[in-house]
């Protein structure tokens, strides 16, 4: 990979907390011309990759998370007032979906389905038809949905990373996977490790599920094959306490990871080993591949976003 260009100006890091402009989440739009990012302070911005200029998207101040539908250019956000809103980036129009302190959410690529969870033992599945936005069903979970919630791009699969802590038992984390048409999970993964609250994601082709792990102050990553439960990648014992960022390449053959120690690794899933390893002088908070395979965006703790050439070195 080679450096392409930088978005944002370098800022002096704080010791007590991350800067408000550090990107917590990032995603490219469908044609790979824009990068949408939510900062640690809650502000959502859209970067134009050609002009390298940014615009703030409304007065959102997203709280904790957002989800993006590439097909419809819409955001699902939990705003500062705890309203769950569907926002069109093109028109700027907002639709209030519901109210309440939902801890996690996800959105299908075509914008027709959404997931919401309050961090308790259930997942709400919402149908987002233009004239009728409603809860289609509620899925009960084995443990509280505290570690992440995601919907595959095609809207066919749901994954919830669930966790609990009990005296004498320690942490227990499981992942349940459902077909969106079913009431019962098709797969339950008992991880045996603590999963971070940072990432749980399907590969673009929905054949794999990736998560970050944390055990004994060392982080790691896992990738499972959906359906069979076969582990495609299992790494642990990293120097950093948390692996904060994960993202699949567009055709699902590589996984990029970024951690608090500034380590950027790109893993060849078929080989089970990292093929690229670079270390930055600052932690990595978020990662995103562009859909066209040209770029990998790296959000760093100095509030900059490094855009790296990807396709130049890999025949995707």
Image (cartoon, grey):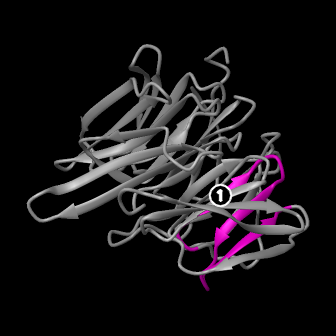
On whether residue 71 falls in the magenta region, the answer is: yes
Along the line of sight, which residue is nearer the eye, 233 or 130? Answer: 130
In the rendered image, residue 182, in percent from the top left (x then y), is placed at 60, 45
Q: Residue 219: in sight, yes or no?
A: yes
Along the line of sight, which residue is nearer the eye, 22 or 12? Answer: 22
User: Residue placed at 66% from the left, 41% from the top?
Assistant: 156
Q: Residue furthest left?
A: 168
267 relative position to 68: left or right: left
In the rendered image, residue 277, in percent from the top left (x then y), is placed at 41, 28
Q: Residues within 10 Å of mark 1 (few under 14, many from 20)?
A: many
Q: Residue furthest bottom?
A: 81
Residues in magenta? 63-89
In the rendered image, residue 140, in percent from the top left (x then y), is placed at 47, 60
Q: Is residue 188 above or below residue 38?
A: above
User: Residue placed at 78% from the left, 54% from the top?
Assistant: 112
On whether residue 19 falls in the magenta region, the answer is: no
User: Residue placed at 79% from the left, 68% from the top?
Assistant: 133
Q: Which residue is mark 1?
A: 67
Asked which secondary structure carries label 1, the reply is: strand
Q: Is residue 23 above or below residue 263?
A: below
272 relative position to 132: left or right: left
Q: Tell me which corner region of the image, top left, top right, bottom left or bottom right, holds residue 315.
A: top right
Q: Is residue 23 above or below residue 64?
A: above
Along the line of sight, which residue is nearer the eye, 66 or 16? Answer: 66
Q: Tell me which corner region of the image, top left, top right, bottom left or bottom right, holds residue 314.
A: top right
Q: Tell me which corner region of the image, top left, top right, bottom left or bottom right, holds residue 1.
A: top right
Q: Residue 36: in sight, yes or no?
A: no
Q: Is residue 115 above or below residue 280?
A: below
């Amino acid at each position: 990979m080679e450096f392409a260009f930088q978005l944002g100006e370098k800022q002096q890091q704080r010791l007590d907390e991350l800067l408000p402009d550090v990107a917590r989440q990032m995603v490219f739009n469908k044609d790979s011309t824009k990068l949408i990012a939510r900062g640690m302070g809650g502000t959502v911005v859209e970067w134009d990759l050609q002009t390298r200029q940014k615009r703030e998207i409304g007065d959102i101040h997203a709280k904790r998370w957002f989800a993006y539908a590439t097909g419809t250019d819409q955001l699902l956000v939990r705003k500062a007032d705890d309203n769950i809103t569907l926002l069109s980036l093109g028109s700027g129009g907002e639709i209030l979906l519901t109210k309440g302190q939902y801890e996690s959410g996800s959105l299908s690529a075509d914008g027709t389905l959404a997931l919401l969870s309050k961090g308790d033992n259930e997942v709400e599945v919402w149908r987002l038809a233009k004239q009728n936005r409603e809860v289609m069903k509620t899925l009960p979970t084995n443990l509280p949905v505290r570690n992440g919630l995601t919907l595959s791009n095609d809207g066919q699969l749901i994954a919830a990373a669930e966790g609990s802590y009990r005296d004498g038992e320690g942490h227990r984390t499981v992942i349940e996977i459902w077909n969106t048409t079913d009431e019962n999970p098709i797969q339950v993964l008992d991880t045996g490790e603590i999963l971070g609250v940072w990432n749980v994601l399907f590969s673009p082709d929905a054949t794999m599920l990736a998560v970050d792990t944390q055990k004994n102050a060392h982080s790691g990553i896992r990738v499972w094959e959906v359906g069979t439960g076969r582990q495609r990648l299992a790494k642990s014992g990293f120097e950093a306490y948390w692996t904060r960022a994960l993202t699949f390449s567009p055709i699902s053959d590589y996984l990029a990871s970024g951690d608090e120690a500034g380590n950027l690794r790109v893993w060849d899933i078929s080989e089970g080993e990292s093929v690229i390893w670079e270390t930055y002088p600052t932690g990595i908070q978020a990662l995103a591949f562009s859909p066209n395979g040209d770029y990998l965006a790296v959000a760093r703790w100095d509030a900059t976003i490094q855009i790296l050439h990807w396709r130049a070195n890999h025949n995707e």
